[in-house]
Amino acid sequence: MRHWLDTLTNRTILLLLIGIGLVHFVSLYAYQVALDQEMSSAGEARLADRLLTIRQAVMRVAPNEREPVAHEFSGGAVEAHWSRTEHAIPGGPGSTEWDGLKRRLRELAPELGGSQVIIGANRKLESDPHLALISLQLPDESWVNVSLFARMTPQTGNHGTILSTTLMALGVIGISILLVRWMTQPLSTFADAAQRLYRGTETVSVPEEGPREVRELASAFNDMQARIKTLIDGRTHALAAVSHDLRTPLTRLRLKTEDVGDGPLGNAMRADLSEMEAMIDQTLAYLRGDRCDEEFRQIDLTALLETLVDDASDAGSSSTLAGPPKLAIKARPLALKRAFSNLIQNAVTYGGVARLTLVQTGKNAEIVIDDDGPGIPADQVEAAFAPFTRLETSRSKETGGFGLGLTIARTIVDGHGGSISLANRSEGGLSVTVRLPLTGPDASRP
Amino acid sequence: MQSEDDSTPQMVAHSGAAHVLIVDDDGQIRHLAAKFLRTNGMRVSQARDGVEMREMLRSAAIDLVVLDIMLPGRNGLDLCRDLRATSAIPVIMLTAKGDDTDRIVGLEVGADDYIAKPFNPRELLARIKAVLRRSRAPGVVGTGAAQRGFRFDGWIVDLLRRELTNPDGVLVDLSGGEFDLLLAFLEAPNRILSRDHLLDAARNRVSGSFDRSIDVLVSRLRSKLEKGHANAPEAIKTVRGAGYLFLPKVEPK
């Protein structure tokens, strides 16, 4: 149910429609009930008058003329007959509807006195509640039987009701769209500003206008933005200072190792230095996160992976790449190279080898990196992505690095609108799958 | 923290060797780098900041400046911009590692190359040699001393960014060794280059302790160049017993 109820506009329209519709129908119902009552009481009075008139007329004439007189008074919905016995039987379906009529008859004609009034179904047609028979007893014990073909049915304007309801609903929808747009406009501005603050480096101050709640929110939001920027700036400056301060002694050490020469000692020192530099590099990359200035460009993914696999092979592993001769993808070249470098490094370090397969699947590039290592316990797959995590249970401290490789790779791949997943291969070893959209991240993600 | 002899610019008698000026506020780095470059056949002067740098440039014939970005007083970017306004002397910037902004800005203010700190001394030497070689190449005209790039068969080589773009405008990644090898070819088109010559061009890029076979490097570069087109013409020809020949017509960018 996310699709159309997802926006505030639609939710508000629905709410207003339910609310106003409910009020509309309740008032329509109350009006209808009142109208019904009005009409039936008027009808009852008319009917009672007519019944009494018939009774009086029949009573005044001799018994042999009574039937023709009764017949003369018939007409419309009313058909009267005179007889020695009553035709109506009390009770039956719908009989309570006639209690009002009975009461009114006695009210209008107190002279009815003890004589009987029976309203009920016809003896012959018991099942039809709308065909009622009224039997009025005359003083000489004979009866006037009046049958009613139908009760007065209230004229309901059904078409008018549907039309007015529809018009009202359309009005509600139209007005809600305008109103809600107007009210939620500031929220969209906030979302946009928050996105830009997160992606870029500039704060975007939101105008403090609109209703009071929105003004307060805008003020709090601007305040928060300023504080976040201060925090980030502080951290960035601290980082720059630390990394610059470390760079100087590291550069000196690099230069000093040249005096040691190319022997085992010099090479070991250079290897240590490389490791330290890589650590600083990784930490800086991690802290930078996806606040990356690098531009998206068309790059050849095959060539990039080839360079990395060649480097890995030169460093002594038998790493391979299988894939198309070229595959252009919109990406940040340096960031993406770092991500794959980390993944290949992990495969070689823990699995001895990195076997890469590159395929194009629809609008994505899919890169699978297999190794022959111990894999990762199934319950630790997600933990492997957490920063500063090294799954030491099966891995030796000798292997170097300090647990940022996967974190950085995932951040970079996410920043490209792609995904990365780990799985243990049935033959043993870990399989890392990276999916990257060929056209870069969605346009909706600035 | 500066010792006395650091603060006075050192004058070195002119000879055939290239004369490099190192501008860095860290005395140890200056001394150690100078020593390293001297043992590799260069003449080296040092300056601590922009003021000393200008003094040095006035009093000596400097062939190339290695300029740190983080300097007291005017920073390296400003100094490089100033320098470009008056001179075509080659400049290699020392940038902060992983800081893309520094790198891009450094190139925009007219540096010829950049190298990230902490740098591998052998790589610095290689970069200095490469920039000097390009700046001394005959017929080179550019905003800086060195040429900014090459074109061949629709491919574009950007020397500043060290980038190769194929005829479709797609960036093709090259390793450092492959890029330097390509440069060696581009600087000597239609000439047969011996393995030794190519090894010399690419060797100093290799930071490891192993020696990569030049044939492997050539085959990797060849594969990246020739896979770019569906019906790519042969780019690098093997001349049996002599070396390799780069076939496409090369133009300055």
Image: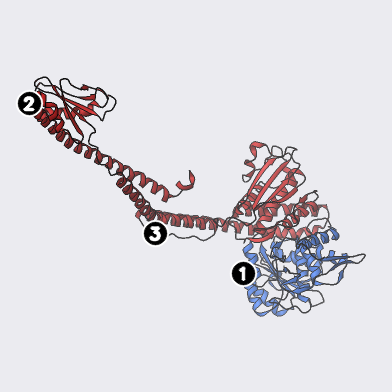
A321 lies left or right of B213: left
Q: Which chain is blue?
A: B
Q: Earlier in the sequence, mark 3 or mark 2?
A: 2
Between marks 3 and 1 in the image, the one whose residue lies nearer the viewer: 3
Between B44 and A193, the one lying in front of the other is A193
- Respond whether the residues carrying marks 3 and 2 are from the same subunit: yes
Left or right, A169 with respect to B96, comes to left
Q: Where is residue B55 drawn, in percent x and y?
A: 68, 77
Q: Chain of mark 2?
A: A
Tag 1's secondary structure? loop
Q: Position of residue A124 (x, y in %)?
A: 26, 23
Q: CA distance from mark 2 to mark 1?
A: 122 Å
Instruction: Find the distance from the CA under tag 3 to the CA under tag 1.
Output: 40 Å
Give the crowd class for mark 2: few <14, some 14-19, many >=20 residues within 10 Å: few
Q: Chain of mark 1?
A: B
Secondary structure found at label 2: helix
Colour basis: by chain
What amino acid type should be assigned to the residue bearing mark 1?
Answer: Asn
Secondary structure at badge 3 equals loop
Q: Amino acid at mark 3?
A: Glu
The residue at which mark 3 appears reads as: A208
The chain assigned the colour red in the figure is A
Q: Nearer the viewer, residue B68 or A18?
A: A18
Residue A79 image position (x, y, % from top left)? 19, 31
Amino acid type shown at disc 2:
Glu
Instruction: Say which of A263 and A432 sits in front.
Output: A432
